[in-house]
Image (cartoon, grey):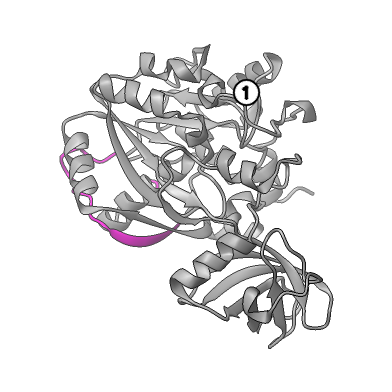
Amino acid sequence: MIDNFSQFLANFHYTLPKEKIAHQPVAERDQSRLLLFDRQTGRYSDHHFFQLDQFLNKQDVLVLNETKVFPARLLGKKDTGGKVELLLIKTLTSDSWQAISKPSLKLNQQLYFPPRNYTLDDNLDLEDLLQAKVASCQRDSALVEVKFNCADERLWQKIESCGFTPLPPYIKNKQSEDLRRSEYQTVYAKNIGSAAAPTAGLHFTEKLMEKLKNKGVQIEKIDLAVGLGTFAKLSRDNWEKQSLHQEYYQIQDDVAKRLTEAKRMGKRIIALGTTSARALESVFINYQKIPKKSAKTKKNDFSLKTGRESTNLFINPPYQFQMVDALITNFHLPQSSLLMMVSAFASQPNSPFIFKNFTQSSLGEVYQHAIKHDYRFFSFGDAMLIV
């Protein structure tokens, strides 16, 4: 017998041929394809990303996430001699991190990580190594807390020299680390802190940004640190609590004021990517204390506030978007929380279309068109503009 959670997941399933998964980006970022989808009418059309300026104007505000990916994957050895891999998830203090380990570790175990182009067999001095001690761990769990032998800026420098970029598990390529650091990063990335890229932004070039500015499009920047939880499968606990993994975001005072004024003036707020959308919806809910599935608020009834906050917001149908009026996003994995968010954006109460399941939805029809016409899927794939 299928329980409610299993049925919930099944409602977001679709079949994707493996050859549609993009394992590397196109040669020129803005040469990726762009599928324009009008969620109010269900109509869609095929374009390229460099044509984005044709669909935006001076009444639009484009909100992008300027977070920067850091090399969060560390490869080294345990004090017992065995190999170890750490995926850094969240900074706890100036010298401590929460991480996922492979294999599982023991309390007080010492770990050693060499610079990226060296191995532990290269007779390096201990001072050349990034060292960590297991400060906390749980039985039968890969989640650990580690304390490093340096802190603050020195620790970041060591992570930069020792770490590797953690690509999503569905991407298989043999790119060099230097190439990965370049290609898996937006051209406007600024604030170090993400283990994964806000991939909708990978399509942008400096030239395209200038074209949008010259057309009068207002461009605003926020920061949400993308965690490895974005790749995680939805759990029963997520569904029961209607919450996801925790991520941190920040909106500066001047940006909040301009976004508030833009919304009051009736401008169209375009979220570049699901991370920007999640941050915008979260800041609205957190500060206005509005129920997550409430009726739409009048545009003059709010004032965005600022600061560094965390969010575990889980957006799925039906959900009334309060801040976001249009969305630029890639094509997402079946049964993923990102697909659920986009499904909510494309269905009631945000459009005339009732969501029953993905395959029968208007968005599902668009995905089938994309599959049939050889769009490239997931992180290095093509994009959609949903209006």
Left or right position of 40 against 161: left
Residue sitting nearer the eye, 374 or 147: 147
Left or right position of 204 against 128: left
* Spot occupied by residue 253 in the image (x, y as percentages of width and height): 21, 53
Residue sitting nearer the eye, 268 or 190: 190
Q: Residue furthest bottom?
A: 108
Q: Is residue 339 magenta?
A: no
Query: In the image, what residue occupies the spot 25% across and 54% down?
Result: 288
* Spot occupied by residue 190 in the image (x, y as percentages of width and height): 40, 49
Q: Quadrant of the C terminus?
A: top left
In the rendered structure, which amino acid carries the disc numbered 1?
Tyr
Left or right position of 60 against 192: left
* Spot occupied by residue 88 in the image (x, y as percentages of width and height): 60, 65
Query: In the image, what residue occupies the spot 16% across and 31% down?
Result: 265
- Using the rendered image of the protein, determine whether residue 294 is visible from the camera's viewpoint: no
Tell me where the magenta segment starts and ends, as one range: 292-312
Query: What is the number of callouts on the image?
Result: 1
Residue designated by label 1:
367
Q: Is residue 310 magenta?
A: yes
Establish if 340 lies above or below 36: below
Residue sitting nearer the eye, 39 or 306: 306
* Spot occupied by residue 186 in the image (x, y as percentages of width and height): 48, 39
Left or right position of 203 against 286: right
Residue sitting nearer the eye, 62 or 68: 68
Establish if 283 lies above or below 99: above
- Element type at mark 1: helix
In which quadrant of the rendered view does residue 340 lie? top right
- Does the magenta stretch mainly form a helix, a strand or a loop? loop
- Using the rendered image of the protein, determine whether residue 129 is visible from the camera's viewpoint: yes
